[in-house]
Image (spheres, rainbow, N blue to C red):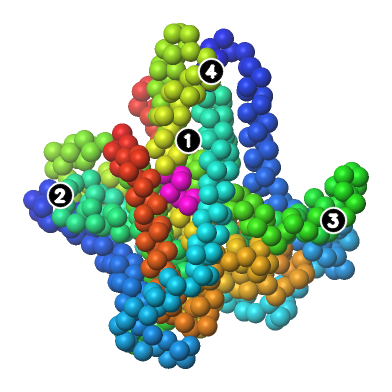
Amino acid sequence: MSGSSSGSSSSATPYLQVAPLALIMIAMVGIPLATVVLLSFWESDGILIYPTYNLQNYIDVLTSPVTLSLFLKTLKFASITLIFTAVIGFTCSYFLVFHVRNLRWQIALFLLCTIPFWTSNIIRMVSWIPFLGREGLFNTLLIEAGIISQPLDVLLFSDFSVILTYIHLYTLFMIVPIFNSMAKINPNLIEAARDAGASSFQILRYIIIPLSKTGLALGTIFVVTLVMGDFFAVRVMSGGQSASVVSAMKNEIDQLYYPQASAMAVLLVIVVLIMVSAVLRIVDIRSELAR
Amino acid sequence: MAHNNGARGPAFYFLAAFFALFVAFLYGPMLIIFVLSFQGPTGGLTFPMRGISTHWFADLLSSSRYGDLGGAFQRSIMLGFLSMSITAVVCLFAGLAFRRKFWGAGPLFYLSIISLVIPGILLGLGISQLFQLLGLHLHWWLSALGAHLSWTLPFGLLIMFAVLNRFDPSWEEAARDAGATPRQILAYVTIPILFPGLIAVALFGFTLSYDELPRSLLTVGGLNTLPIEISNMTTNVTTPALYAIGTMTSALSFLAITTAFIAIAVIQKRRARAHGDQAE
């Protein structure tokens, strides 16, 4: 509150209240992003950076055949992860909302799904290694069961392990918004449909899925942006054999090619923003959130 | 789906099994490394266990081969608490502000969302280069703290929206009508009612900062945070010491989560009791 004597209805109050947030966000997000855009027009030879203002970095990035393959690879990771997280997230939320009838249990199981969010992603990533490795638990079990005779190499340090890690890390970003959407569905609606003779499948198809669209859209935005922004999982879990846009960017940063990395980053952000606005065009999240 | 007659169909059991599998998928790998971190001194990165010991924990704490883990841990804890306090205070007031229309509300909201969806490493690059251009030095308590806030504040803001959605402003109006000053309203009405939500904001502020990697990498300056040290270990360390650090840092995260949940539960219970007393 502003502390003004006329009560908290002074018109300056919201500005004073929001000023700290605005200052930090402008200083630590707005201006740094502008700096990246500025930097993308500069030049670097790996030792020094020259303020030159030309489009050379963009021309280099856009004409390099590597760029396209990096973007395609990243989109492949994002789309496979999206499909799996959406199916798993939808199924788990559906179970929690419509099958777990005790509210206490519902909250407890929901929290069980979200707790890993507050723990270290690096550790959750690393914890797949003893399970998937050549001498890992999974290979050992398969060999002892007589299903395979040689350990499977594709389990770890492959695209498979990268995508598995993404699904492991990011499914909860689907569960939370879908759960939220589903919890808002009026049970009377389903009751009415059932009384009118709708089958469980019809209820799912014509009531629950359409009414969960907002949650699915929010989850999609989270999962796609998280996968497209990742460099660490793809580096660690592919054993350095795979690369995504951001991991390639990280390599350029490590070699002090900041302007080149910035140009790549600007392109990536444009692609991500186009995808996000495409999702927003299909589902009006802001009006639905206010519900 | 509402089985009104109380009988549970095959769909329930199928979905329950699916959910159980998902939970196993979520927690299984972590449990494996917790177990493996107690590997005997001659044991390796995978099963079998060659005895049970705390050798790798001791190794982690005593050996200098793993870098400056103690210092990194202290810095991460400090950053966590700084981020937590700043996030709770800033988001409380920002949340209150967003209840009214003000000039710039839309752009500020979108800036917060952009901060959530852009790659963290990119923001780190921006912050570090901005400091460079301004001739400032990178410090974990300045540039890295700013980078962490760019991550914790938008989350805190979204939670405040959800919390304030269920907050009835007529409590504040009643206090105002009774002659309370804005400061008194804030201290005796608004904050106490919102307190469980603020604990949730604080939990996000601490844990998201404590585990943050991509935004920290380019902004910490000379001294690393714990996640950076751990990420270096993932490529250098090939002993169960890697799991030992995983167990320790996860234990701390779980401690933070449990503390927050218990605090919220205690407040809710006390409120329910106070409510019951009034009803009698």
> What is the magenta range?
A218-224
Q: Residue at x 52, y 25 (%)?
A: A98
Residue beneath disc 3: A151
Q: Residues within 10 Å of mark 2 (few under 14, many from 20)?
A: many
Pick the residue in front: A234 or B76. A234
The answer to whether marks 3 and 1 sit on the same chain is: yes
Q: CA distance from mark 4 to mark 1?
A: 19 Å
Amino acid of disc 4: Ser
Q: CA distance from mark 2 to mark 4?
A: 52 Å
Few, some or many C-alpha atoms within 10 Å of disc 4 (few <14, some 14-19, many ≥20)?
some
Whichever of labels 3 and 2 marks the residue nearer the N terminus, that label is 2
Quadrant assignment, res B176 = top left
Reply yes or no: does residue A258 show up in magenta: no
Residue farthest toward the left in the current orientation of the protein: A6
Residue A35 x/y as whole percent: 33, 75
Q: Which residue corresponds to mark 4? A: A200
Which residue is disc 1 drawn over?
Answer: A179
Is residue A24 shown above or below B138? above
The numbered mark 3 sits on a residue in which chain? A
Tags 4 and 3 both on a single chain: yes
Location of mark 2 (residue): A8
